[in-house]
Image (cartoon, rainbow, N blue to C red):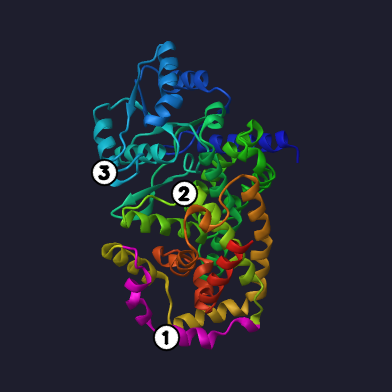
Amino acid sequence: MLPQVADDAIDRSLRELTLEAGEAPGKTRHIAVDADIGDALAAWLEREHPGKPDLLICDNNTRSAAAERLAARLQLAGRRSQLLTLPAQEGEDHVVCDDGIIEALTTMLREHPDANAIAVGSGTINDVVKMATFKLGRSYQCVATAASMNGYTSAIAAVLSRGVKRTLPAQQAEAVFADTDVIQRAPAYLNRAGFGDLLSKPYSNADWLLSHFVRGVNFEERPAKLLDEAYEALLGKAAAIGRGEAAGIGTLTRTILLSGFTMAIAGTSAPASGGEHLVSHYWDMEQHGREEPLFGLHGTQVGVATRISAMLFERLVALDVDDLDIDAAVARKPDASGLEQLESRHERLQPDVIEEVRAQITAKQKHGEALRQELTALRDRWPEIRDALRAILIPSARIGEVLIAAGAADRPSAIGVQREHAVRTVRVCREIRSRYVALDLIDDLGFLEPWSAEVIEAVERS
Ligand SMILES: [Zn+2]
């Protein structure tokens, strides 16, 4: 498909989705992707929110990258627009989306009851404004300054809440203005991170579909397939994205917006967040607990983890019915006593965080006869399940290639995670979230221990 054709197709999907949103609160009903969105933003605000003041919420970086200029532009158009710069928390060099800052912004917004809250930024700023306005029952608008993650049009937010990285229910931005000039000028590692975050799609979907087969979780075709075309176009533009070329950034930005919608439509992050995300979340939780800097941006880590996930899935779908040894599985997990030793499995997590992990894994782990029943049902349908997964997956080698083409990290050691650490992460990260993923099945079948070591070895060696 020609590059422009792909962008047009994505634009058509985005238009359809915003039209479907209608006037429903908490949904994205307007999207503009353009080289300079200042006038479009002013015109839309005048039309939709005439006479209301604008509060452009930014941090120090996005203030100079976009917010100051936009405020001046809006004032020129006759609007009362002012900046609100969020400060980095003590000991941090950038704003972190945690309970404290959400509470602080909520208080500030109460003092401006009729203002448009306009997030000018990417991951963190968007999540902070999204959560604060959601708590207040108000809508918000967003000016995207980097294509670093897919949260602009999602109805959830990633919040560091009481030490645990949580995905909390929230709302979509009412309108998203993506200025491709600003996004193109954003630091390359931000847009490469967005690319890494999006790479997970086939594997997130495979996890989601597997949970449907094994646990009866609701699986929907539409959000699962919505990104198919865009995903192919995105892989084809990996090098252009890495070099920050307009054609690559345009497709990346559109795909980021479409990806957020897949989660909003599904009513769960499952279409864009599977086992690979648990690897990234786990590293964040460890580093926060130890008050150490993160290994990388969310999407940078997800890109690396996606390559690992891809290899694990390849091994899983290569299994034959005869390889599924249910007696051995039940013998390994006869009861819940295996969950008593969590402290030694999560050495770098704080005690209160381990208790939260205990609750999550206890909610999904089956033992004894319940495990036998589940695995027997799976074995009876294994050829069908395996084929369905194969139809979604793409080869792990392709993921490795596009990560390199985009100039993104392609292995744990490239972001400072040592081999043994990476192996341990793959073995235990499934325990932090109660959602069933392939890592759970692989562990139940007794393969997670050996495969994690083999896969990390392969990833680091290549
Ligand atoms: Zn993500």
Is label 3 within 8 A of ligand 1 (CB to nearest ligand atom)? no
Q: Secondary structure at mark 1?
A: loop
Indicate the position of residue 383 as horizontal and vertical percent values.
Answer: 67, 74
Q: CA distance from mark 2 to mark 3?
A: 20 Å
- Residue type of the residue flagged with mark 3: Gly
Q: Of helix, strand and loop, which mostly describes the magenta segment? A: helix
Q: Residue at x 34, y 37 (%)?
A: 133
- Read off the magenta span: 322-349
Q: Is residue 100 visible?
A: yes
Element carrying mark 2: helix
Marks 2 and 1, how far apart at CA: 36 Å
Residue 393 numbered tag? none
Residue 334 is labelled as 1
Tag on residue 298?
Answer: 2
SS at circle 3 = helix
Asked whether mark 2 and ligand 1 are closer than 8 Å, the reply comes as yes
The nearer-to-camera label among 2 and 3 is: 2
